[in-house]
Image: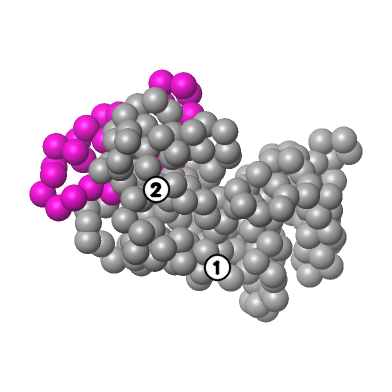
Amino acid sequence: MRVLVAEDEPVLAAQLRAALEAAGYAVDCAADGREAGYMGEVERYDAVVLDLGLPQVDGLSVLKRWRAKGFAMPVLILTARGDWHEKVAGIDAGADDYLTKPFHMEELLARVRALIRRAAGQASAELVCGALVLDTRSGRATVDGRLLSLTSHEFRVLAYLMHHMGEVVSRTELTEHIYAQDHDRDSNTIEVFVGRLRKKLPPELIETVRGLGYRMVCPP
């Protein structure tokens, strides 16, 4: 899963990146509204953390432009303490949630998880497919209660497929959602990650749809 962090304060931006990466996300950062607006239009994100007080172009204008162009990725806005009018304006402009600075990082992570789950139509923090359970809170996957040993990229592939259970997901789409912008992307490595996952999961959970991609298929 991939997240854009649009925050101009370097220390906070670094803290957000570190916390999100530790939670298993691929993270891109933008330090101003112009850069954030462009990245949100040309890259594929599962969620955006957007500071409204960005330089060059303010976060509210960035959000309005995204929504006007039909970009529907979940957006969590960050506002200064006491600026209740910014929260209202942000929600009216199409934000999905907000946090007031200062905030606890655990709360931000919980809100990002919830936004991504809701966008994928998942209600529970635990995604279940037969004997396979992925706990989005702890970033752990188990089969029949046994913890799976997964690399960061294997986990991202599995998490994306489980958030989109029953849907056909192309290799290109997986590539766009498991790598950060500055990573050397190669869609051929997706086959490697899927092959490794299949060896660790119950048989036939990940189905190859010829010429289209992969689908997570849960037993009845």
- Residue 92 is inside the magenta segment: yes
In front of the other: label 2 or label 1? 2
User: Magenta includes 117?
Assistant: no
Left or right relative to 88: residue 70: right
Going by the picture, which residue comes out furthest to the right?
210
Is there any visible trace of residue 122 in the rendered image? no
Relative to residue 144, is residue 1 drawn left or right? left
Q: How is the image coloured?
A: one colour
* Residue 175 in the image, given as x and y percentages of width and height: 70, 47
**Rendered position, 198 above or below 36:** below
Helix, strand or loop at label 1? It is loop
Q: Which residue is mark 1?
A: 139
CA neighbours of label 2 inside 10 A, class few (<14), some (14 to 19), many (20+): some
Measure the alpha-carbon separation of dots 2 and 1: 28 Å
Q: Secondary structure at mark 2?
A: loop
The quarter holding residue 183 reads bottom right
Observer-nearest of 184 and 21: 184
- Front residue of this view, candidates 96 and 180: 180
Which residue occupies the extreme top position in the image?
68
On the image, numbered disc 2 is attached to which residue?
A: 31
Give the magenta-colored segment's residue range.
Answer: 67-93
Drawn side of residue 94 relative to residue 69, left or right: left
Q: Residue at x 77, y 43 (%)?
A: 171
Placement of 182 over or under 37, stated as above or below: below
Q: Earlier in the sequence, mark 2 or mark 1?
A: 2
Pick whichever, 144 or 200, lies toward us.
200
Q: Residue at x 41, y 21 (%)?
A: 68
Tell me where residue 61 appears, x and y as whole percent: 31, 29
Which amino acid lies under the numbered mark 1 shown in the image of this protein? Answer: Gly
